[in-house]
Image (cartoon, helix red, strand yellow):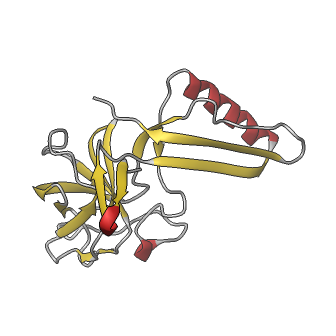
């Protein structure tokens, strides 16, 4: 979600002003749940209403498109060691360009793939990649991202994540719906990104 105000004026002039920090919103739903699964969602709802947060991610794109499928990311980093989707933020060129290391050689990232920059467990920034990139033989890739990384919050050292890249979210008040109509239970809720210090 990017807050903007667009004014259309005489003479076919249009002005758009952007304000605030862009943030993520999500809508989740599941159908045909078992009674045991419904019980888990009930417990989740109780935690969420008591101030709990979630690591929200795009369930349809849990990893880069080149590695889409049911298996989590795996492999060997170019410098040695197992790769599970976690890497290192090597440097920040500017708010829209970051350099990542600790990748397998030839690791491919496409336009639209997600990338998470993590300062700590609850301080995360979720972005979309805007230009295809491939990791070098030295395990490094330069990524162009949208929207800009908040350089006042995200300074080195940080980690970077490609397996279920997420941001911290809270469930929107009143959005949780779980009609108990046996045998076809359905659940849905919406959530909004939460900026934690």
Left or right side of 106 for 187:
right
Q: Could you tell whether 89 is left or right of 181 in the image?
A: left
Q: Residue at x 20, y 71 (%)?
A: 78
In this figure, what is the number of numbered marks? Answer: 0
Vertical side of 153 occupied by 128: above or below: below
Residue 83 seen in the figure = no
User: What residue is at 55 percent from the left and 34 percent from the top?
Assistant: 172
Location of the C terminus by quadrant is top left
Residue 60, horizontal then vertical, whole percent: 54, 63
Q: Is residue 1 above or below residue 194?
A: below
Residue extending furthest right? 182
Which image quarter: residue 98? Answer: bottom left
- Observer able to see residue 143: yes
> Where residue 154 sits in the image (x, y, percent)?
19, 43
**Which residue is at 34% across, 69% downward?**
75
In the image, is 12 to the left or to the right of 24? left
Q: Which residue is outermost to the top?
A: 50
Percent position of residue 82, x then y? 30, 62
Q: Is residue 177 above or below residue 87?
A: above
Seen from the viewer's position, the closer of residues 181 and 173 is 173
State which quadrant residue 21 falls in. Answer: top left
Question: Who is closer to the viewer here, 36 or 176?
Answer: 176
Q: Is residue 104 above or below residue 164?
A: below
């Amino acid at each position: 979600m990017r807050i903007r105000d667009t004014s259309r004026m005489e003479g076919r002039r249009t002005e758009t002003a952007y304000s605030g920090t862009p943030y993520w919103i999500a809508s989740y739903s599941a159908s045909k749940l078992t009674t045991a699964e419904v019980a888990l969602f009930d417990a989740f709802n109780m935690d969420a209403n008591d101030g709990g947060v979630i690591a929200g991610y795009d369930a349809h794109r849990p990893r880069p498109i080149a590695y889409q499928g049911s298996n989590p990311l795996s492999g060997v980093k170019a410098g040695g060691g197992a790769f599970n989707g976690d890497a290192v933020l090597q440097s920040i060129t500017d708010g829209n360009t970051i350099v990542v290391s600790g990748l397998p050689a030839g690791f491919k990232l496409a336009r639209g793939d997600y990338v998470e920059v993590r300062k700590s467990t609850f301080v995360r920034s979720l972005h979309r990649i805007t230009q295809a990139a491939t990791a070098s033989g030295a395990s490094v890739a330069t990524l162009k991202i949208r929207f800009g990384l908040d350089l006042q919050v995200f300074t080195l050292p940080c980690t970077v994540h490609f397996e279920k890249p997420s941001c911290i979210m809270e469930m929107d008040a009143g959005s949780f719906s779980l009609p108990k109509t046996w045998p076809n239970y359905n659940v849905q809720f919406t959530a909004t990104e939460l900026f934690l210090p």
